[in-house]
C-alpha cells in the first residue's frame, strides 16, 4: 500500500537533493510522528543537514479531515561531516534551494535554502515553509563555518 508521504514525494516535480529517513519519534496514540531525515548538500561535499518535521498519522487524518496536508513546521541542524569541497554554488543574497519536500498535494512545501555569507566564510541553511497563497514565518536556521580550526 502506498503511503501518503510516498504519494506526496512522487508528486514532487524537482528535488535538488535526496533525503534519507534516519529516525522517527512517536508523539501520540494517533500515529503522529516526528520524522528525522538526513540531507546531503548536493553542491557542497562534506555538509549534511538533519531535518525534523511533523507527520500526521492515519487516525489524526480521519478525525480532523484535511487528508492531504501535513503541518509545515520544521527544524534543521547542519554540520560538517567530512572534508568540505564547495562546487558551483549560487553566491547571490537569494542563495539557492538545496532540498524541497511537499507538505500538501499542491500548495505547501518545506524547503531548505543555502546562502553563502562570504564576509564571514559561512554557509547558512534556512528551512522554511513555502505556500503559494499564504506566506509563513515558520523557519529554522543552521550555519556551517568554512574554516579549519588551528
Image (spheres, helix red, strand yellow):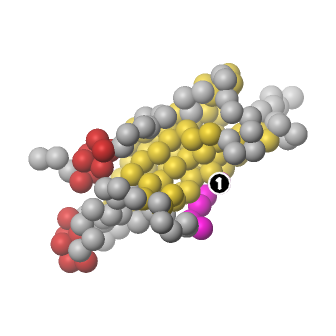
Span of residues in magenta:
137-141
From the viewer's perspective, tell me whether residue 77 is left or right of residue 55. right
Task: Establish if 18 lies above or below 28.
Answer: above
- Residue 87 image point, x, y percent: 66, 22
Q: Is residue 138 magenta?
A: yes
Q: Secondary structure at mark 1?
A: strand
Rendered residue at 42%/59% (across/down): 108
Rendered residue at 48%/54% (across/down): 110
Q: Quadrant of the C terminus?
A: top right
- Residue 57 image point, x, y percent: 25, 64
Rendered residue at 75%/44% (across/down): 93
- Residue 10 image point, x, y percent: 29, 41
- Quarter of the image where one finds residue 95: top right
Of residues 106 and 88, the one drawn nearer to the viewer in this rendering: 106
Of residues 31 and 131, the one drawn nearer to the viewer in this rendering: 131
Of residues 88 and 144, the one drawn nearer to the viewer in this rendering: 88
Residue at the farthest left position: 1
Is disc 1 surrounded by few (<14), some (14 to 19) or many (20+) residues within 10 Å? some
Rendered residue at 32%/63% (across/down): 69
Amino acid at each position: 500500500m502506498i503511503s501518503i508521504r510516498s504519494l506526496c514525494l512522487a508528486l514532487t516535480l524537482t528535488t535538488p537533493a535526496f533525503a534519507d529517513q534516519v529516525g522517527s519519534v512517536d508523539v501520540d496514540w494517533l500515529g503522529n510522528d516526528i520524522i528525522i531525515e538526513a540531507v546531503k548538500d548536493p553542491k557542497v561535499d562534506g555538509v549534511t543537514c538533519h531535518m525534523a518535521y511533523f507527520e500526521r498519522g492515519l487516525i489524526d487524518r480521519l478525525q480532523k479531515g484535511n487528508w492531504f496536508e501535513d503541518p509545515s513546521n520544521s527544524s534543521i541542524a547542519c554540520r560538517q561531516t567530512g572534508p568540505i569541497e564547495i562546487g558551483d554554488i549560487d553566491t547571490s543574497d537569494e542563495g539557492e534551494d538545496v532540498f524541497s519536500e511537499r507538505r500538501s498535494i499542491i500548495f505547501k512545501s518545506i524547503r531548505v535554502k543555502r546562502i553563502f555569507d562570504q564576509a564571514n566564510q559561512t554557509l547558512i541553511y534556512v528551512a522554511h515553509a513555502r505556500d503559494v497563497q499564504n506566506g509563513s514565518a515558520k523557519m529554522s536556521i543552521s550555519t556551517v563555518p568554512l574554516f579549519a580550526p588551528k
